[in-house]
Image (cartoon, rainbow, N blue to C red):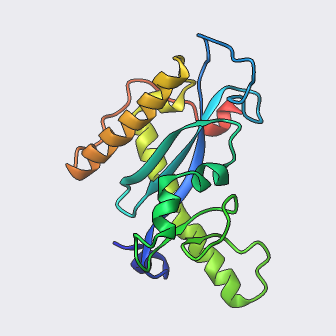
Amino acid sequence: MSFMKSQDFQEFLAQLTAHMFPYSHLIQIREKNSEIHRKGIFSINVQRVCNTELLFMNVVSRWPGSAHDATIFNNSMLKMQCEEGSFGNRWLIGNSAYPCTSYLLTPLLNPSSVADNRYNEAHIKTGNTIERCFGVWKRRFPILSLKIRVAMQTTQVIIIATSVLHNICRLNNIRDVDPEVTMPHESDKN
């Protein structure tokens, strides 16, 4: 199913978002705390792009938790490909952390008409795809739901490796295995 069929949008490429992955920086505390995000914990801000089949199309896992989502995108190969027109007349959708461009559609901050409201509603519904993909990924690999207690470089490898394995499982219709432990909900961690 395409985004066009699912949410009244035409020719969407994918959904873009970023997410913080907390990790325990036990090996070395850096002098500049660039990996500490606004909640005061070490983290990596990961850019993720997925399609309607819940496949990751792009994952960037090298930015510290203090990096803004738009900064990650602005320095990515994905942005360069979009600006070069590599994806034709197709768009990414992103949240309000990203700038609205000819290839990246974001919600309207102050909708003033019925059409504006319908656009935002379709944007929200379409945006649920990335959250669903992320939920499937985290259920399949429970380590992603916990504070990862390894060095930052190892955390980055875990994020990329589980993204690739997630896509392999999705492409080969490998069903999820019931978790051996119950994972805390996101709301329980705050």
Query: Which residue occupies 53% across, 18% down?
Result: 151
Q: Residue furthest bottom?
A: 114
In the drawing, does residue 37 fall left or right of residue 165?
Answer: right
Count of marks overlaid on the render:
0
Would you place residue 91 above or below residue 138 in this image?
Answer: below
Viewer-side residue, 8 vs 159: 159
Q: Position of residue 162 (x, y in %)?
A: 37, 36
Would you place residue 114 above or below residue 133 in this image?
Answer: below
Q: Is residue 116 visible?
A: yes
Q: Is residue 140 visible?
A: no
Q: Residue furthest left?
A: 172
The picture quadrant where one finds residue 178 is top left
Q: Position of residue 42 (x, y in %)?
A: 67, 26
Q: Quadrant of the N terminus?
A: bottom left
Viewer-side residue, 126 vs 61: 61
Q: Position of residue 133 (x, y in %)?
A: 44, 52
Q: Quadrant of the C terminus?
A: top right
Q: Residue furthest top?
A: 27
Query: Which residue occupies 51% across, 17% down?
Result: 150
Would you place residue 70 above or below residue 23 in this image?
Answer: below
Viewer-side residue, 85 vs 134: 85
Query: Which residue occupies 40% across, 71% down?
Result: 87
The picture quadrant where one finds residue 95 is bottom right
